[in-house]
Amino acid sequence: MPDLNWLQDATPAFRLAMATSWLAPEPWQRNQEEDIGQAIDSGPDWGEYLSLVNRHQIQAVSWAALSRVQVIPVPDTVKQELESRTRSCRILGVQRSLVLAEVLGEFNRAGIPAMPLKGPVLSFELYGDVGLRASDDVDVQVPAEDLRRAMDCLESAGWRPGFDFRAMTPRQWQSFQRNDYEMLFTRAGCSLELHWRNHWETPDATSARWARSTAALWQGHSIRMMSGGDLALFLCVHGAFHIWCCAKWLGDVARAHSIGRLDWGAAMNLARSLGLEGVCPAAQSLLHSLYRLEVPILPGMGAGGGAARPSPLLVAMPLECLKLSDDPRGREGVALLRNHTHMIRYERLVHPGKAWWKTLAGLFYCQRDFRMIPLPDALFWLYKPLRPILWMWRWAQQAEAA
């Protein structure tokens, strides 16, 4: 486990932001309230704190955590700002919930199984409140074999895809479905990401996850919910592939763990089968470092069984990333390229068994290439040697736009 003194080098505002990045249930509430009190006693810069609340997407949960502490000297202007952000977050959560219900209704009528990811369903599962966890869009996963029908359902309901998939040739479509894992739809200012797999999974692993899922209802519509092991692995890998740069994701894992929703043993077994054995131990180390949470010893982590212990960088890099004043995902130009290179290095630690050629193929592949140079299927093979050139072209365009 990392040294708990890591936070002592941070500003009081940062320590307060980390302490309020989740809502602790009993018996962890006292620890959270102690951390909040110590940060406030140190005299936080409230402007910095408000900036960090947005940076880490904890608008509503931060005020929920602060407001239940009996005596805290929060300035009235800060209190009003946090209450305003909480209202906005709740309104958006309700709106996203209604959009999701409409989409699920379309899929139910078409007989398409649907598995909501994150968003209002996760917020309700963790907190009993669709508006406490901030989310920017709606994420829904469907089986790969139902992807075309799901896309047709969305289009018939007024959603517009981010690209014209109907213009793809059969070879382009096969490549897209094999290399990508989501596609964007928009309607009236709302974004929806349609998924058909998790990018770290094999096709067999995706099918097995669907088989382990359980049936549930969301506002009267049928959905599939991930098992405790699958949810633990999903939350940990999703955060890991973003270097845990947003405290909201660690707050999700902390809350899910503390209410008994996660099956760490099953998650570790799944992670090993996918070559991701360092992901769960790293997430647990981060939970202990930020929230002082007690976590179970995973198989292989006990005395004499250290195979499951994560690389120190799997913990150190996220801790440094969390301290960044800006979200690295929003960078542009050379800074974005530098961040992309940093991400690839971390991905190699997260998924060490992944072949280098697959990493490079993922770096150079982009479905936009099919629009930039619409080759017929007879010449589809040309995309492979052209990918590095097209990649440099895309970066040059982004740098110019920045």
Image (tube, rainbow, N blue to C red):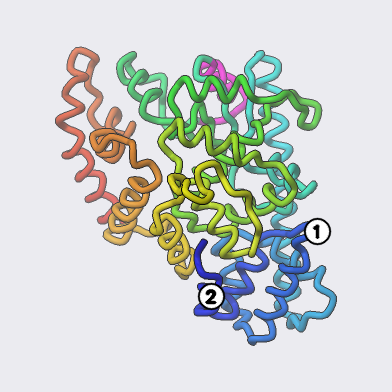
Residue displayed at 46% across by 50% down = 309
Q: Which amino acid lies under the numbered mark 1 shown in the image of this protein?
A: Glu
Tag 2's secondary structure? helix
Q: Which mark is residue 26?
A: 1
Q: Position of residue 127 (x, y in %)?
A: 76, 50
Residue displayed at 20% across by 34% down = 387
> Vertical placement of 141 versus 316: above or below?
above
Specify whether residue 238 is in view. Answer: no
Magenta-colored stretch includes residue 277: no
Residue displayed at 74% across by 80% down = 74
- Judged from this view, the residue extending furthest toward the right is 70
Q: Nearer the viewer, residue 267 or 12?
A: 267
In the shown orientation, is residue 193 left or right of residue 356?
Answer: right
Specify whether residue 375 is in view. Answer: yes
Q: Position of residue 164 (x, y in %)?
A: 41, 26
User: In the rendered structure, are the residues bearing label 1 and label 2 in contact, judged by CB atoms less than 8 Å apart?
Assistant: no
> Vertical placement of 293 versus 280: above or below?
below
In the shown orientation, is residue 92 left or right of residue 194?
Answer: right
Q: Which amino acid lies under the numbered mark 2 shown in the image of this protein?
A: Asn
Name the dominant secondary structure of the magenta segment.
helix
> Vertical placement of 264 versus 50: above or below?
above
Q: Position of residue 192 (x, y in %)?
A: 57, 36
Tag 1's secondary structure? loop
* Res 288 → quadrant: bottom right
Mark closer to the chain start, 1 or 2: 2
Q: Which mark is residue 5?
A: 2
Q: Position of residue 217 (x, y in %)?
A: 77, 28
Residues in magenta?
146-160
> Vertical placement of 82 versus 317: above or below?
below
Q: Residues within 10 Å of mark 1 (few under 14, many from 20)?
A: few
Residue displayed at 50% across by 43% down = 300
